[in-house]
Image (spheres, helix red, strand yellow):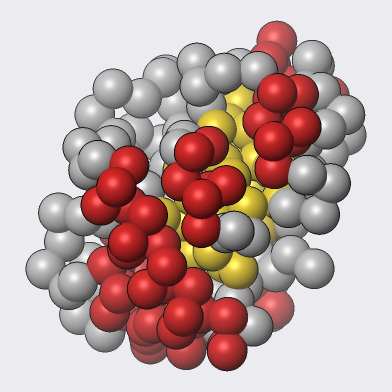
Amino acid sequence: MMGPIYAVTDPDATPTVIAQAMAAARGGAWAVQLRDKRASDADLVGLARDLLGVLRPLGVKLVINDRLNVACATDADGLHIGQGDGDPARARARLGPDKLLGLSVETLAQGGVVPDCVDYIGIGPVRATATKPDHAAPVGMDGLAAIIAQSGIPAFAIGGLGPGDARAIKAAGAVGMAVVSAIIRAADPEAATRALCEEWEKA
C-alpha cells in the first residue's frame, strides 16, 4: 500500500541518513528512498541493512535508488530506477514479483511507454531542484497532469516540491509526492513530514 509522502534521503544533509529516515518515518512517510550517487555498493549494503532494521518495525518501506545489486543483496522493499539505469524487465526478474519497482519519467513520450512490470512512476522534476543538478527540464504542473493522464499508472511528483503544493499535485492526478529538501533539510524533519501528510489529507 502506497501513501502520499515518499521521503528521499540526502547524503549531503546534516542529519545522518539513519536520522533522516527515522524522522520521515515517524512523521508519516510510507516509504524512504535511499539515494546516494557516490557511495560504493558495499557501503550502501551496510547502510540499507541498518535502515531496514529501523524502518521495518515501523511498517515503512525502504526503496533503493538505482542500485539493483544493493536492493537484491539486502532484501529491500523495492528499487527505483531512472531511464538510463537498465531494463525494468530485467530488474523485475531479479527483484521478484513482490518487491516495488519504480521508474523515473521526465517526458510525455516516456510516460507513454512504461512497462507493465513497473509499480509506480516518479514524474519530474516538476520544478528545478538543487538536489539533482543534472535533472531534465522541469515539467511543471501541466506537464505532470499530462504525463499522468497518458501513463495510467500510479505516479509520484518529484522535484522542488514542498508545503503548499499538495492541492495542485493531487489535482494533477498524482497519488503522492516524493520529497527531499522540504523534509530532510527542514529544521524539524519529522514535523515537516507530518505537516505534508496533513496537507495532503486536506487537499
User: Does residue 163 appear in this view?
Assistant: no
- Quadrant (top left, top right, bottom left, bottom right) of the C terminus: bottom right
x and y percent of residue 83 in the render?
Answer: 55, 19
Count of marks placed on residues:
0
x and y percent of residue 2 in the render?
Answer: 74, 65
- 124 w.r.t. 16: above or below: above
Residue 49: quadrant of the picture: bottom left
Residue ranking furthest to the top: 109
x and y percent of residue 118 in the render?
Answer: 77, 36
Residue 51: quadrant of the picture: bottom left
Residue at image position (56%, 41%) is: 80
x and y percent of residue 117 in the render?
Answer: 83, 32
- 168 w.r.t. 87: above or below: below
Q: Nearer the viewer, residue 201 or 19?
A: 19
Residue at image position (27%, 79%) is: 19
- 139 w.r.t. 62: above or below: above
- Quadrant (top left, top right, bottom left, bottom right) of the N terminus: bottom right
Left or right: residue 157 versus residue 115 is: left
- 126 w.r.t. 197: above or below: above
Residue at image position (26%, 84%) is: 188
Residue at image position (57%, 47%) is: 72
